[in-house]
Image (cartoon, helix red, strand yellow):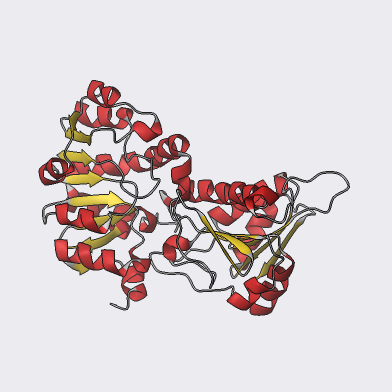
Amino acid sequence: MIIGLPKETKNGELRVGMTPEGVNALTKNGHHIIVEQNAGTGSGISDDRYEKAGAEIVTDPKILFSSSELVVKVKEFQLYECELLHPDLTSISFLSLGASPKLAQALLKSNITAIAYETMELVDGSLPILIPMSALTGRLAVDAAAHYLKSNQGGSGKLLSSISGAEPVKVLVIGAGTAGFHAAELALNMGAEVTVLSRGVQRLNSLKESLNSNPRLEVDTTSTHKIEETVKSADVVIGAIRDAGGSVPNLISRVMVRSMQKGSVIVDACIDQGGCIETSRETTLSDPIYVDEGVTHYCVRNMPGSVPRTATESLVNASLPYIKLLAEKGVEAALMSNTPLSKGLNVQKGKLMNPGVSKALGMD
């Protein structure tokens, strides 16, 4: 199989879809890998390392796309990239189509087969590719909040790390999944008081048990009253809910945001699915924040892209077995034989294949 590894084009995205070790494993099995020049530079991987692993380096993305049977990316295609797609192409990457109707329409029109990492699901319901990236996102959300709470960044001037004699910072995490757990764990370890709200009682109990019932941790089920009450006193709000392939509901209204202390911070870590806060709108790694209702909003869609070396290693460790399967068996056979890949199938031959995505786009 001819596999293309393009350079990422999303703002600030420095991850890459495959490491030289992955390239080497595939080329040893007779596959041909085409890598766009400087695709791995942001992750500390030189073209020379890819060449030594057996890849061909090309300078023109048009050549890469037209020559490839499978394209391995990290983030979704930008709309202008869709002009490079052809019906015999399969892609595997994050897509978040449920919150991206224009991209969904472009992919349908292109007639490619598109597999989305975020909807790949094991038999037990766990998400093998999304989990490591969600873990990174949860930790980065706390890191961003700590930075933007500083007064020189327009924040309230509070230190998220606790210190003797000062009131601890109050952090609200909406969602008790992987991102929510890692956000809560890091914030607790830094000394904050943390409240986690979720509609899933089992997840809340599991989170509480995993965090050793920390005395600075409160968990509760989601309700409008509880959210309203907790948002008002929070220094930091982290949105960390997910919907399999679809878009997430707004749980925090503008009125609630208005009730927060000026200089507080919101990190909407589910902005790739539309965001769960009414005042959220997508930002980029090069222009990550804005202030609305006196509150700093950080709503970057590709947060792990800010730590590309760590994120690339973690992502490829999870994704490479599936890429190998697609290469060895062929796309159709791999989709038929592997549950995560079949769940990950979002677009094929001009049709939406994932029920969650279809419902979110009103096309079910």
**Left or right: 209, with 355 as reference point:** right
Q: Position of residue 188 (x, y in %)?
A: 71, 49
Front residue (pair 81, 119)? 81
Q: Position of residue 92 (x, y in %)?
A: 27, 50
Residue situated furthest right in the rendering: 165
Q: What residue sits 63% from the left and 71% below the top?
A: 257
Quarter of the picture holding the N terminus = top left
The picture quadrant where one finds residue 102 is: bottom left
The picture quadrant where one finds residue 57 is: top left
Q: Is residue 309 visible?
A: yes
Front residue (pair 338, 312)? 312
**Left or right: 136, with 198 as reference point:** left
Q: Position of residue 25 (x, y in %)?
A: 27, 29
Quarter of the picture holding the C terminus = bottom left
Q: What residue sits 57% from the left and 51% below the top?
A: 141
Tell me if residue 305 comes above or below residue 278 in the rendering.
Answer: above
